[in-house]
Amino acid sequence: MKKPVLEFQNISMQYGADPSQSRQVLSGVSFQLEAGRHVSLVGRSGSGKSTLLHLAAGILIPTTGSVHLAGQEISSLKEQQRTDLRSRYLGLVFQFFHLLPHLSVGENVALPGWVAGAPKTETSSRVKELLSRVALADRADDPVGKLSGGEMQRVAICRALLLRPKLVLADEPTGSLDDATGGQIMDLLLEMTEAEGGSLLYVTHSRQLAQAADHVWELHDGQLRTSEPTAGE
Ligand SMILES: Nc1ncnc2c1ncn2[C@@H]1O[C@H](COP(=O)(O)OP(=O)(O)OP(=O)(O)O)[C@@H](O)[C@H]1O
Ligand SMILES: [Mg+2]
């Protein structure tokens, strides 16, 4: 078996310290996500999907249990080490893109490279390569705020992939797009993570888009149900 890029061991997550007000969102969640896999995560609103992604990214620390990202136990790391691990191993894609509107398309994609101190020439050739793969090479100098939603999400995908992350986490990446654009974005995200050899864990409310993954996992009553491989496997 390939080494997992992400592993949850008996994770419970409770928000709020006061027991009378606190809410148990996840209880006893365990899984391994192997390198190169595509997994979709479904479940009702409030079932804890975003919470699970935030735990995977080390943005939240679990109440009990352990999260290993690329073999490292996240909660044992200091904040700065967690940030470094996140920038080295993870690409993040969000529903509302989280781009910087005053920067250009190319600058938005290049940003993780600048933050990581990667050589400028390497970063700029990677930016060009990625933007041409999403058919936005000719928009590199435009302010990102001028783009449509689908175009912005293509830019966000390029930014997430810039440093060739082992794992991409995407929280409703098609949630603010129409069905046709959402379908294209999902295809692009699957295709590009596959081409780069990375794993992908994405949240979606669409049963159809969920089926495009190798596995569909469902959160229900704080528990994770992992499925048999989908037909695409
Ligand atoms: N910071 C917080 N403090 C307290 N409760 C929180 C916090 N963040 C989330 N919750 C609660 O935890 C539960 C799970 O939230 P989460 O955002 O993970 O759900 P979700 O499955 O992503 O939902 P959606 O599909 O609507 O995005 C919800 O009941 C939510 O109200
Ligand atoms: Mg959510």
Image (cartoon, grey):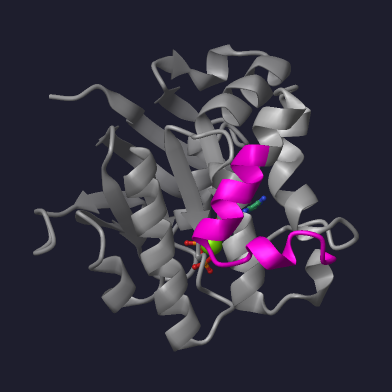
Task: Return the x and y of residue 159 as percentages of the image width and height.
Answer: 63, 48
Using residue 165 as the reference point, say whether residue 4 is left or right of it.
left
- Where does the magenta region start and end? 125-143
Quarter of the image with the C terminus is: bottom left
Residue in view at x 22 percent, y 53 percent: 225
Residue 3 as seen in the image, left or right of residue 72: left
Residues 1 and 159: in front is 159
Front residue of 20/113: it is 113
Q: Is residue 17 visible?
A: no
Foreground pick, 233 / 21? 233
Q: Residue at x 45, y 27 (%)?
A: 64
Name which residue lies at 40% across and 52% down.
Answer: 192
Which part of the image, by quadrant, shows the N terminus? top left
The answer to if 127 sits in the magenta stretch is yes
On whether residue 222 falls in the magenta region, the answer is no
Does the rendering let one see residue 191? yes
Residue 63 place in picture, x, y as percent = 51, 31
What predominant SS class does the magenta segment belong to? Answer: helix
Q: Nearer the viewer, residue 138 or 200?
A: 138
Point 46% across, 70% down: residue: 185
Q: How many marks?
A: 0
Q: Is residue 211 above or below residue 49?
A: below
The x, y position of residue 224, in whole percent, is: 28, 49
Q: Quadrant of residue 187?
A: bottom left
Q: Is residue 218 above or below residue 74?
A: below
**Rendering coords of residue 173 (x, y %):** 52, 65
